[in-house]
Amino acid sequence: MLQQLGGGSPRAVAKPSSPVAKVSESQPRPAVAEVEIAERIVTADLLKERVNGSRLVVVGQKALVTPAAWDFIRERGLTLNRGEAKSPSTTTGSSKSSAPQGAKTASLLIVVRSTEAVERLAADLPGSWRRELLGCPDDAAKLAIGELSRGGTPQAVILAEQAHRAACLANRSDAAKAVAVRDAGDVPVVRKQLRANVWCVDPSGRSWFELRNLLRAISQ
């Protein structure tokens, strides 16, 4: 029997260790606090492409959000803000709003019934107004309530054939004091009796001049 030189019990010869396979762990991408969309028209397809785990969507002050995009926002439980996106230094460790203090929030024009006069009016909107397009008065009332509740707008105008329905639905919320009006002449009368913040108008048969005067009266 072959014995190991030097006597004693034979030593166990260690086998070369097999290389340990490194487990490739894909590092999860950090959640983005917000996503900024600079396009003039915000569609559902655009949101699906850009929103990757973000909960806050920031769009321009005058960007148009399509009805399908609003459906996507509601289904995903997202929050939509208007204005400049927060800088990286303010996205973490700060709960303050990105809007500068003292900034005036734009009034909201919600268009359900679109006419040639309405389109001309929307194209000439002053900077103190922004427009949204929706498909029915029910959605318009919900949007007005949501914007008023979170302080996104001081007041809203809903242009819809079913103006009285929109006003009734908006008044289900304590945040809204809605009224249906016909023209600019109704505005001072309403203000003597009610601090209205949602104005519902049927634009059918109304001229651009009439609608412009109505917005001017509400803006005062």
Image: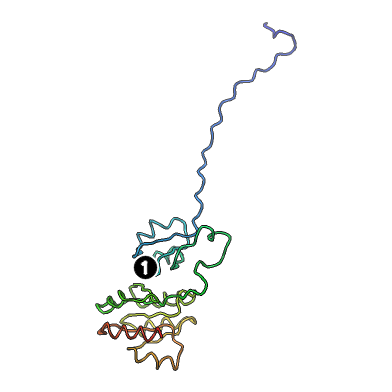
Residue 143's place in the image compared with 183, above or below, is above
Could you tell me residue 61's position as x and y percent? 40, 69
Q: Residue at x 69, y 16 (%)?
A: 11
Residue behind mark 1: 63
Could you tell me residue 128's position as x and y percent? 40, 77
- The amino acid type, in three-letter code, at marker 1 is Ala
Residue 71's place in the image compared with 19, above or below, is below
Q: Secondary structure at mark 1?
A: loop
Q: Quadrant of residue 83?
A: bottom left
Residue 31's place in the image compared with 76, above or below, is above
Q: Residue at x 37, y 68 (%)?
A: 63
Dot 1 crowding, Cα within 10 Å, few <14, some 14–19, many 20+? some
Q: How is the image coloured?
A: rainbow
The quarter of the rendered structure image containing the C terminus is bottom left
Q: Nearer the viewer, residue 4 or 210?
A: 210
Number of marks present in the image shown: 1
Residue most extreme to the right: 8
Residue most extreme to the top: 1
Q: Nearer the viewer, residue 138 or 99?
A: 99
**214 displayed left or right of 207:** right
Residue 145's place in the image compared with 90, above or below, is below
Q: Residue at x 40, y 92 (%)?
A: 188
